[in-house]
Amino acid sequence: MANMFNVGRDCQVVLLWNGTRINMPIVTGFQSQQQTHQVNSTPLNSPPIFTDIENGWRGQFDVDRSSADLDSLIAAKEAAFWNAGTIGQGTIYQYITEKDGSTTTWEYAGCTVRLSDAGRWQSENKTSQRLEFNASTRTKIS
């Protein structure tokens, strides 16, 4: 019987920073979470009332380091800020191959990124990095 659920290998992630693609050939994990601002009211004469106000997305991806591309992105981002006060933004595209063979594409727009783990360097082991992001919106492209 065919596998009826996604297993992780069905996902690809692409990062564009100021229009330039940042190469991450060995992405080993991707995770995102919707962010909301929770608002509630506690009326004296009825049960509580709750709502969630959209407040962007956050997430992370793990990468096996195969080049200096992520390190260079962070260095350029820092230099742009300290030299000119420039704060750049990026876009993340997530491509999911669905079980029926179709592809779903999500666009995370207005992204900020930070290298939360630049890697641990040790003998006879791979070096992994973690990039965390915040995004203003997630939009379904296809």
Image: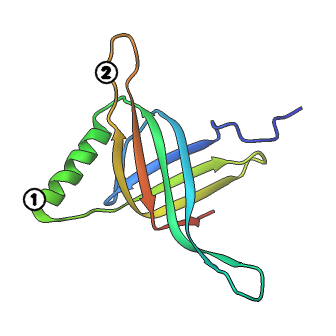
Please tell me whether mark 2 sits on a helix, a strand or a loop: loop
Check the image and report above or below for 21 versus 67. below
Q: Which residue is mark 1?
A: 83
In the picture, the quarter occupied by the C terminus is bottom right
Residue at image coords 28%, 34%: 68
The picture quadrant where one finds residue 140 is bottom right
x, y percent for residue 116: 36, 42
x, y percent for residue 60: 47, 46
Seen in the image, is 30 located left or right of residue 42? left
Residue at image coords 37%, 30%: 65
Q: Which mark is residue 100?
A: none
Check the image and report above or below for 92 versus 9. below
Q: Nearer the viewer, residue 74 or 26?
A: 74
x, y percent for residue 117: 36, 37
Check the image and report above or below for 42 versus 58. below
Q: Tell me the crowding category of disc 1: few under 14, some 14 to 19, or many 20 or more residues within 10 angstroms, Cα based.
A: few
Residue at image coords 33%, 16%: 122
The picture quadrant where one finds residue 85 is bottom left
In the picture, the quarter occupied by the N terminus is top right
Seen in the image, is 120 located left or right of residue 85? right
Q: Which residue is mark 2?
A: 121
